[in-house]
Amino acid sequence: MLRSGLRLSLAQRGTSSGWRVSDLRGRTRLTVDAAGGRHQVLLPIEWAHDQADVIRETVLAIHSAHIDGIPLDRAIAAALASDEPAAEPTAEQAAGPIDWPELVERFKARKLSSGAIKPRTWEAVYRRRMAELLAILASKKPPTNPRELLEAVTARWSDQPGSRGRQMQVQQAAALLRWGVDNGALPVEWAPPLDLDPFVGRKREGKTITTPIEVSHILELVEAIPDARWRFSFQLLAAYGLRPEELQHLQLRGGRLWCNYRKNTSRGETKPRPLRLLPCDDWAEAWNLLEQFKAQPLPPMRPGFGAEDMGLYMRRRRRWQELRQQYEAEGEKLVLYSARHGYAHRAHLICELPPKVAAAAMGHSVETHLAAYSKWCGDDVVDDAFERAATRLGR
């Protein structure tokens, strides 16, 4: 009732349709949908019926200032500063400046005592980033609000928008602030923005092109995988060009192995399909996968997380690590999908299957197939295809 009443009241007073308020852990959250994206901020106002007038007038003041051209952050700060000048100081304000090193130690103690992380995780993942955070807060002109702090911690990542390091720095800084506010160690004004994407940024470079795995490396990995269940999983990926998630959707039907996985894409839903070994893959025939499937159980994997679970297991295999480094040294990238890419590569280069046939065997559209695999069709591949065609035609 409070939410709907405020929405109607704000609309009647002239706020834009993209402005709304809601409850977040007992406090008022302001959400603004603008041309630049969605902005959310936690206001230091209790979400309660007796605060409805305060919430409404504060949001109207912010909206009025923003319409006049003042940036949203500054409009919010101005509205809150002029709201109740005679307000009593919070316990944190009365206690003086924030002791950030002590806050970090308390945050660490809670993380460890709750079992959320292990000591070695703190040392390997958190300690360096917390030290960088404290250095910024101890500078001559330290940040005075959460947005300034998040902007400061991303300064050294300015040329790496969207990078994993920048993402983790932002997330851990926000986690510290959020924990501090939730546990009363920080005033509510230090609550981090709910949307961290503007601080993380987006990668400018395109996706790294992953590489078809070579058959010799497939055979090496099969020999190097000690667990029969995971070894069988990798054999299925390599022999049938499966997506890792499809391992959990296999079924024997009419003496053939079928994949019942349905993937929703912009081009429609994929259909169940029978799995086929490529005519060139005699090494896969020797594995006798149909008989194995009847007797060999697959490893436990979480539904929807097949790629993550199998990826974790493979990253712990020494030979996989060595091959990844070898591929990277050659400017390429080895991932689980490299087994699927290898299937497509052999289907075209060795078996000379048309794209329509290869796409059907792999369970996706011709458009998806061409978009994903045409990148490997260099001049050498084209020349080889023309030579084979000439040979077939006797010219």
Image (cartoon, helix red, strand yellow):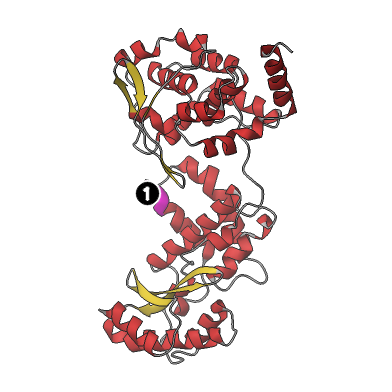
Q: Residue furthest left?
A: 1
Residue 109 at x, y = what percent? 42, 52
Is 132 placed left or right of 31 in the picture?
Answer: right
Residue at the image position 66 percent from the left and 72 percent from the top: 141
Residue at the image position 59 percent from the left and 26 percent from the top: 212
Residue at the image position 46 percent from the left and 29 percent from the top: 360
Residue 203 at x, y = what percent? 62, 52
Determine if the magenta segment contains residue 318. no
Region in magenta: 110-115
Q: Residue furthest top?
A: 286
- Position of the N terminus by quadrant: bottom left
Residue 11 at x, y = what percent? 39, 85
Is 336 placed left or right of 377 in the picture?
Answer: left
Determine if the magenta segment contains residue 112. yes
Q: Is residue 385 above or below residue 95?
A: above
Residue toward you, 233 or 343: 343
Judged from the image, the secondary structure of the residue bearing numbered disc 1 is: helix
Tell me if I can see residue 336 in this picture.
no
Tell me if I can see residue 362 in this picture.
yes
| Magenta span dominant secondary structure | helix
The amino acid beneath tag 1 is Ser
Residue toward you, 255 or 172: 255
| Residue placed under numbered mark 1 in the picture | 113
